Image (tube, coloured by chain):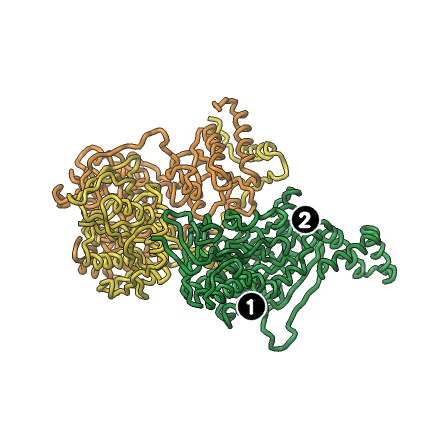
Amino acid sequence: MSGDDQAAAPSAAAARRAGGADLGAWRGVWVYVELERGRVHPVSWELLGEGRKLADHLGVPLSGVVMGPDDAATAQACDEALRHGADAVHVVRDPVLAHYRTDPYTRALTELVERNRPEILLLGATTLGRDLAGAVATTLGTGLTADCTELRIDDETRSLAATRPTFGGTLLCTIHTLEYRPQMATIRPRVMAMPKRDPQRTGRVIEEQVALAEDDVVTKILSYIPDADADKAQLAYADVVVAGGRGLGKPENFRLVRELAELLGGEYGGSRPVAQAGWVGADRQIGQTGKTIRPKLYIAAGISGAIQHRVGVEGADVIIAINSDPNAPIMDFATYAVVGDALQILPALTEALRERLGRRVAA
Amino acid sequence: MVMHIVVCVKQVPDSSQIRVHPVTNTIMRQGVPAVVNPYDLVSLEEALRIKDRFGARITVLSMGPKMAAEALKKCVSFGADDAILITDRVFAGSDTLATSYALSSAIRTIGAGQPVDMVFCGKQTIDGDTAQVGPGVARRLGLQQLTYVSRIEHLDPEAREIVVHRRAEGGVQVLKTKLPCLVTMMEGANTIRFADMDAMFRAARCQPIEWDHKAAGIGEVARCGLKGSPTVVKKVFAPPPRANKAEVIDARDKPAREAVDALLAKLFAKHPQIEEEIDR
Amino acid sequence: MAEKFDAIVVGAGPSGNTAAYLMAKAGMKVLQLERGEYPGSKNVQGAIMYADALEAVIPNCRRQAPFERAVLEQRMWLMDERSHVGSHFRGTVDADEQPTRYTVIRANMDKWLSGKAQDAGVLLICETTVVDLLKKGERVVGVRTDRARGDVFADVVVLADGVNSLVATKAGLRPRVKAQDVALAVKEMHFLPRHTIEERFNISGNDGVVVEMLGKITKGMVGTGFLYTNRESISLGIGCMVEDFKASGVSPYQLLEELKSHPSVRPLIAGSEVKEYSAHLIPEGGYNAIPTVHGDGWLICGDSGGFVNSVHREGSNLAMTTGRMAAETIIGLRDKGRDYTAANLKSYRRALEQSFVMKDLKKYRDVPEILHGNRQFLTTYPELLTRAAHTMLKVDGVDKLTKEKEIKRDFVARRSRFGLFGDAIKLMRALR
């Protein structure tokens, strides 16, 4: 363990914590492009879309940051970042960065930030993004706001207004990082809309060098074990989602949810309480701390709709809520509020749709 | 040599029971029980299993108001050996950066007594849900950072080696690193044990040690509390009601099928794209 | 090495906390075991607390105790579907009188009283359930908990484990609680701004209003409703005998929903936000259902012993009082160096009999049975009385004598002269 605090070297901190003039030296919106095992996580594009709006509002450039091995996937990631709206891409190509590890990635990203001084840095709130963001923010001694649902620029202070749920999701709060730079924020997948991809769009690719040595990295990757596809939830990108909550009464009743989801060719999920109780796997938890979804159709049965659930499903086009309590919060923000017993409505709905589709689903 | 493990815990309001005042929009905390952050218990249980297996001394540490001592006592009832509460007015208003500064200073002070081999933190708290304090502490103390660990596959205290499974998108990274390290555990990795009566008595009689910022070894007060927090909460509010009111279908006084037919009729009339989506 | 204490108190509700507190204050080594997460977590109450009962335990504590409002006005409503007829008592008799009753929030009260007990030296362990009593022959010598290495010993065990009292039943100390001896009550907390409550109920400062309700709100079942004002919320609830719920198939929640929309109640809770829903069993068997409350090495107090005065809705009052008497009995024996045998502990029962506790319960011992066999008190009479009031108050040109005759005819038609006479006798007997 180190003897003194390894974060925020005094000089850098002093430079950061200055008044107007120094802060003005920090310009630009950066989005971390999460490249891992040859694939970019789509949340990176969603963030470029959001970053574009912020950059335009501030009148500054939007840049992506790509870190990876020197190969085709990394090159492809740079091009795609430009096609999704970045003006420039800063790229570090190094075999030490072949797969994500906290230490080298943190070192590389912090060095890039100190060198280029972006005023805003956005990362996806994936396990990688949150691990990296926490380490980088502490090293830079700056502010980090996690799981934001909305980003705006406050014109008065020219600072980022990051809104996120608070108190376990019962309220929302808006957070600013006024006197430190960069202003960091993580955003969950599917919270922001996917921007249009312009195949013609190009921009600058800026090569960055960071001194990294494999011997300096203590953590080694032994292997990667992919999840078995069988129960792989594709909730975040599903167009139809059916979910159940405590109002279903017993875990056995969840089959009604699954049957309807299956019939509609969609995904199924559950609210936070039932995920915590083990009625569905944690990867099927819908809500701000679970999965954010943006389906065309969302059917919620026996879910009361507390804020943390609401922010996870607000992006749905049509929401059908089934609840026996007409005053449940979800009945306010749904498109259709069916007041009744979910245990009767769900099978009736499945039945009606089955007849309509003229299909026989195996029992 | 017996390992020394520090487990950071936080006392939080049981957020499932939190209410918002209908008029003032403030949080009504009365009657809401305070609990040990559930994610912290997963990490504590993992530390206890290491203790069962290899022998270890577990110190639970928390930064909070005096009543947080209850949460620490709870941890002692599960089997932690020592409990330290850092509590001081200067910590008020700390964001995650200021919190990791205070906690890591305290861990350094704790380590002066017996070097710390592992630090466990909860994956995130149920009141803040940021997951930032673990990485912050790891960074400041120069610990190898292992977050979202679903399983500790192998631990060799003698060789100072640890192998873990770490959650990544679509799979699990198998990482090997050296102690000292910081670990945050995924929920579901284990279930906290049901303590025996001896442990309950120990906890009931235990008085956690209280440290103010000086005793915790915190040098720069300006890096604590509100002053040491780069992030500032400007506004707390209830979400605005959705513009369009929901269309209500009352199924209580009619057969379920009738209500469903009414629903589908409206749905398809107003949202033809949904009809398409379903029919495909 | 199993632990041993001077006394073990099972339960951290009002009776358990009172007994534990007093014994610890007297220098005894007391262990208190509570199965809930925290003291009072398993408790639900309206709730009204009697200042005297509390101050008999902790003198002059009313300023620090977490009371909500001091009851200034008591209303008694006899309700039918759309109206009610009733009585009000408001104010004090003497100028400098102290309030006798306060509305409280149960969770806060239990926490506070438990804090006092712990300050006095009680060792409290929560989330631990006593599953059985340890006996040596017939003598209770300790308790067995649901945790490993969970046997704890003591010279005497005070059972304050609530209406179900599973431990006492399991240990064969008392028969299982019968459905006809308990009521199931449900309640909600309705949150409103302070000034709204004060305006609606015509109170100010920390004054409060209590409404007890009877009548058709319980749909012919034996039960009552209540509305209590707290500082920033209203407690609204209703309960009936479990047996009656079973027979009628009506759910308690249904009753509560209908109560909320009764024209006498609805305007009082308009605009509120409901933030808590809870349910609990209440002992209603009265004097006849009280089991043996003492034995070799054990005592029973509170709901566990059925100490509830259903006519006056006094549960916590008797809980604290019986808890106090249990402690005083034990302390008395300890001071004299005598053992806690059944014979010696009999003084507990004697103390109860000599106090208002048993005297009141005896007085109303026939009420449960009478109400049970005479539903008319809760159905026909509310109707008759509200109609009578309505008739008298209507200004429609009819002379008063005619109105009185109409009312009398109504009563006789519904109940017959014989029935009316019989009802009067029954009521007198019950309340005597």
Q: Mark 2 lies on which chain?
A: C
Residue A61: x %, y % from top left: 27, 48
**Mark 1 residue element:** helix
Q: Is C5 left, or right, of C369 in this rendering?
A: left
Q: Residue furthest bottom?
A: C95
Residue closer to the observer: C370 or C245: C370
Residue underneath mark 1:
C51
Q: Mark 1 lies on which chain?
A: C
Q: Which chain is tinted green? A: C
Residue A22: x %, y % from top left: 23, 60
Residue A332: x %, y % from top left: 52, 46
Labelled pair 2, 1 in contact (Cβ < 8 Å): no
Residue closer to the observer: B35 or C59: C59
Q: Which chain is tinted yellow? A: B
- Distance from Cα at disc 2 to Cα at disc 1: 32 Å
Which residue shows up at 32% across the image and 44% down it? Answer: A125
* Residue A112: mark: none
Q: Can the viewer see residue C160 in this picture?
A: yes
| The C terminus of chain C lies in quadrant | bottom right
Residue underneath mark 2:
C221
Residue A195 vertical placement versus C16 (above, below): above
- Mark 2, Cα crowd under 10 Å, few <14 / some 14-19 / many 20+, is many
Q: Is C91 left, or right, of A50 in this rendering?
A: right
Specify the amino acid type for callout 2: Met
- Mark 1, Cα crowd under 10 Å, few <14 / some 14-19 / many 20+, is many
Chain A, hue in figure: orange
The answer to which image quadrant residue A218 occupies is top left
Residue A204: x %, y % from top left: 22, 42
Specify the amino acid type for callout 1: Ala
